Amino acid sequence: MSQEELLVLIYKKDEKAFTHLYDMYSKSLFAVIHVLIKNREEAEDVLQDVFVKIWKNIDSYNESKGRFYTWILNIARNTSIDKLRSKNFNNSQKNLSSDNFVNLLDDSNKLTNKLDAIGIQEFVKKLKPKCIEIINLLFFKGYTQQEASEELAMPLGTIKTQNRNCINDLRNYLKI
């Protein structure tokens, strides 16, 4: 089933469309979510929330503003960031055992593998070092533009401009 056919069915709220939507996008969305939410169970919960949001908010998708995949990817990223910033999630992280800290260190060392899981590692490597740093902070570590500005000691306007330019470079590499 093509993406266009799927969108038509989703707009009609066809139940089979939800299964197709999940089958087509769950792996790539989960990879992005799991980069941000290190806990697998929490990441699975967020993935479920993401698909419910996609289903309920499909009417807010506008093809003229961007690709469907980009739209759902932003929902996944924003939902993950919301989860990370939630009070309950932060409180649950305060009581981590020492085993979890070892896993967190291992997971951060495997960021390259996780990037590869969503298929963009080779393209991100082609970007300028500053672009790699900005994309890593904004998209894979969940920083806001303001936080990235502070982390990199760069003006907010420069971060916004660099981010836009880096994304355009990435689009050129991906030919989208």
Image (spheres, rainbow, N blue to C red):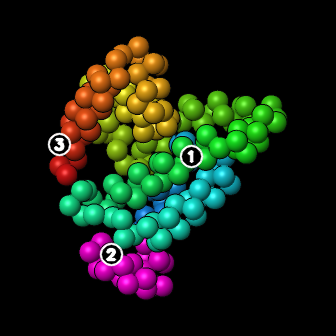
Q: Residues within 10 Å of mark 2 (few under 14, many from 20)?
A: some
Within 10 Å of the Cα at label 1, are there few (<14), some (14-19), or many (20+) other Cα atoms?
some
Q: Residue at x 49, y 43 (%)?
A: 114
Image disc number at residue 7: 2
| Residue 1 visible | no
Q: Amino acid at mark 3?
A: Asn
Q: Nearer the viewer, residue 174 or 143?
A: 143
Q: Looking at the figure, which quarter contains the N terminus?
A: bottom left
- On screen, residue 149 versus residue 88, left or right, reads left
Residue labelled with disc 3: 172
Give the x, y percent position of residue 12.
Answer: 38, 84
Q: Position of residue 153 (x, y in %)?
A: 41, 13
Residue 163 found in image quarter: top left
How packed mark 3 is, by other alpha carbons closer than 10 Å (few <14, some 14-19, many 20 or more), is few
Three-letter amino acid code at disc 2? Leu
Say which label, 1 or 2, has the lower sequence index: 2
Please tell me whether residue 46 is drawn above or below residue 98 in the rendered image.
below
Question: Can you tell which mark lies on residue 82?
Answer: 1
Q: Main secondary structure of the magenta part?
A: helix
Residues at badges 1 and 3 in contact (C-beta under 8 Å)? Answer: no
How far is the residue under mark 1 from the one under mark 2?
26 Å
